[in-house]
Image (cartoon, rainbow, N blue to C red):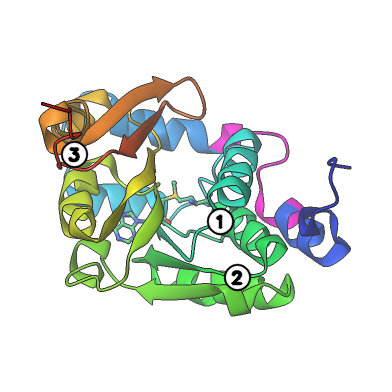
Amino acid sequence: MLNGGTCLDEAKVRGVLDRIGGRSGWDPGEEPALDRLSRGLDTPEFGDVLDVYRTGSFASPPEIGLLLYSAVRSIRPEVVVELGTSYGFSTLHIAAALRDNGHGTVITAEIDPRKVRDATWNFTAAGLASHVEVLPGDAVRTFKGFGEQIDLVYLDGWVGSYLDALTLLQPALRPGAQVYANSTRRFEVPARPYLDHVRNSANGFFSMQVPLGHGLEASTYVSREPSGVPA
Ligand SMILES: C[S@@+](CC[C@H](N)C(=O)[O-])C[C@H]1O[C@@H](n2cnc3c(N)ncnc32)[C@H](O)[C@@H]1O
């Protein structure tokens, strides 16, 4: 039981979370597939990456789920954007926090149509569908022209797409917005353009790596505006 009383403890939310992964950490059965991506080829083809993702859930570890829950309770966002729904493990943590806050929507992108269908079913089964909007298709297409102000982003798809996705979302980031990007240590080479972007303060971010999951880059968008130092 988590302290504070949260809908993460509700039987129907817990039931879906336990069924789709996470509680015991990374599924060791998925490790060989991830190894194939990180071994040999530094920058695998996107099609090969999607073939690997189709073979499993690749759910975020529980500690990232809880970090996302806590961040949403703290920031009290109206809009959260996620790249990589899979079966909805991380999305459900975000949606649970939005419901506990009493407002907000998580807009989550997933390219695999079967996962879109199953995740949508999971959000309904958990009673959290009213806080979730699923964007089917490639995020680098569906994030184009994003019109709403964003308070929190969770990138958990293929690291090689992160910079393109962030470039589309950045104009909509509210100053102070948090951007979390998973797997940036394990896939450091394809993640490099993204890491170079968020670690360059000229681009408006304060950024550091947190030792969670496969390396979680945690960035705060402090905006490109000068800080207003008195003359
Ligand atoms: C690591 S899994 C996401 C796990 C999920 N966040 C969770 O905690 O359960 C990555 C997912 O991202 C999806 N994906 C990868 N690249 C994508 C893209 N460019 N647009 C949309 N979905 C993408 C894959 O199909 C896969 O389901």
Q: Which residue is mark 1?
A: 76
Q: Quadrant of the C terminus?
A: top left
Whether residue 26 is in magenta: the answer is yes
Taking the spot 46% from the left edge, 52% from the top edge, the residue there is 55
Marks 2 and 1: CB-CB under 8 Å?
Answer: yes
Per the model, the C-alpha gap separating discs 1 and 3 is: 37 Å
Percent x, y of residue 226: 14, 36
State left or right for residue 164 relative to residue 55. left
For residue 107, what is the image quadrant? bottom left
Q: Which residue is mark 3?
A: 44
Depth check: give the residue in front, 229 or 55. 229
Tag 2: Cα neighbours inside 10 Å, few (<14), some, or many (≥20)?
some
Q: Which residues are magenta?
A: 18-29
Identify whether 55 is placed above or below 28.
Answer: below
Identify whether 198 is placed above or below 166.
Answer: above
Depth check: give the residue in front, 189 or 130. 130
Q: Nearer the viewer, mark 2 or mark 3?
A: 2
Taking the spot 66% from the left edge, 43% from the top edge, the residue there is 22
